[in-house]
Image: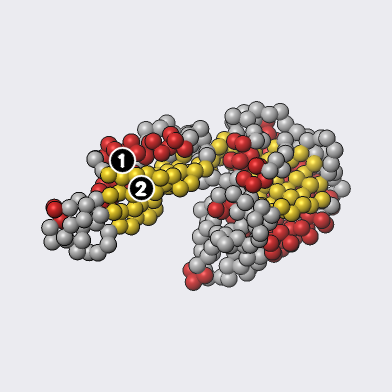
Amino acid sequence: MSAEAAAAAVRTDRVTALAAELIRCDTRNPPGGEQPAVERLSVVLRELGAGIEVVEPEPGRPSVLARVGSGDGPTLLVNGHIDVVPVAEADWSVPPFGGHVRDGLLYGRGACDMKGGIAAALEGLRACREAGVLPPAAIAFHLVADEETGGRVGTEALVKSGLVKADAAVVPEPSELKVGVAERGSLMAEIVVRGRAAHGSDPAAGRSAVADAARIVSALHLADFGIDAHPLLGSPTCNVGTIAGGTAVNIVAAECRLRVDRRVLPGETREEALATVTRLIDAAGEFDYDATVLAFAEGSKLDAGHPFITEVRQAAEHAPVRGLKLGTDARFLRNQLGIPSVVYGPGSMTVAHTADEYVPVAELATAARTFARLYATFRGVTSNDG
């Protein structure tokens, strides 16, 4: 069977080595600077017979687009981001950009989020070539900048430019080798609370914006928004992440600012999510405040009965489906383009963005075998997005 022949050709040492090379490319975002990873990936993609195009919406923020196979047949897209979040090096016990293996774990910033997943997806294609298995569909790779700060010069820019065309897509973010079919989005907002300054010796003569903000924090943090839980994603949540106010310890605070992260379910709009926040604030008391949206990312999902989910699960040896409490670039593909998209990759989001981030070497190989099987069998799917 060609799919199993391709899977058997996966080499653990090779996929680990490529993941380590990508980790050694310092692509912290901010500030960005994905060029070192683009250069290395371009070499690998050419070795795999791909035609490549480098797209650079802003100077120093490149993404590499590649395609293996041609014609009018179906296309399977692999979308992965090559930027990583910053590091506090003092918190690490290993060099964050060293790409070292210890006790079966590959360590480094981006090991699981998500250079390991990209390496696994590329190893799957290399294994097909070495096994003499010709994928029946074209395989496209969009290895992009800027996912960690919203995707404006990454996948979002590609979508707006009309460069994303595919019959189905896999985003190899860390999913613990499960098939992610739904994810929450996020509303990030700043709430400015206004009070009335007075001398600190007579606080009743003023109105403390800090005290009012404290009541608002109590109303919002871990709040129940009265929205039915999603079977895979649970209920919406709210985290009050920062707060700052007042000018001096002996002055009643005239202003206080807090920023909140309200996670949204698929289908919730920016306006609806903001309204649930302001309703809770208004119910907690009479406050003088403004709420301003800083950023919004939609939730997204793929209908549970979509045949592409079944196909990916079969390639992944019947891995279960799951939801993700955070967001990925899959939202652009699902919501803006209607491309059936799943998230599948090695590693766990529980260690993404942490010190001593790692990915199990065994999971790199398992994911690569899944990709090899999928490339060997994908012939297109019937669209049934929801």
Type of amino acid at the residue the image marks with label 2: Ile
Residue at the spot of label 2: 191
Nearer the viewer's eye, disc 2 or disc 1? 2
Q: Is 21 situated left or right of 127 in this image?
A: left
Q: Is 374 situated left or right of 335 in this image?
A: right
Return the mark for residue 281.
1
Query: Can you say whether 154 is above or below 234 in the image?
Result: below
Which residue is depicted at the point 34% across and 53% down? 257
Number of other residues with Cα within 10 Å of mark 1, as a class: few under 14, some 14 to 19, many 20 or more: many
Asked whether 281 or 103 is in front, the reply is 281
Number of other residues with Cα within 10 Å of mark 2, as a class: few under 14, some 14 to 19, many 20 or more: many
Query: Can you say whether 15 is above or below 166 in the image?
Result: below
Q: Is residue 289 visible?
A: yes
Q: Find numbered disc 2 in the image and state the secondary structure of the residue it sits on.
A: strand
Q: Quadrant of the N terminus?
A: top right
Disc 2, disc 1: CB below 8 Å? yes
Asked whether 45 or 59 is in front, the reply is 59
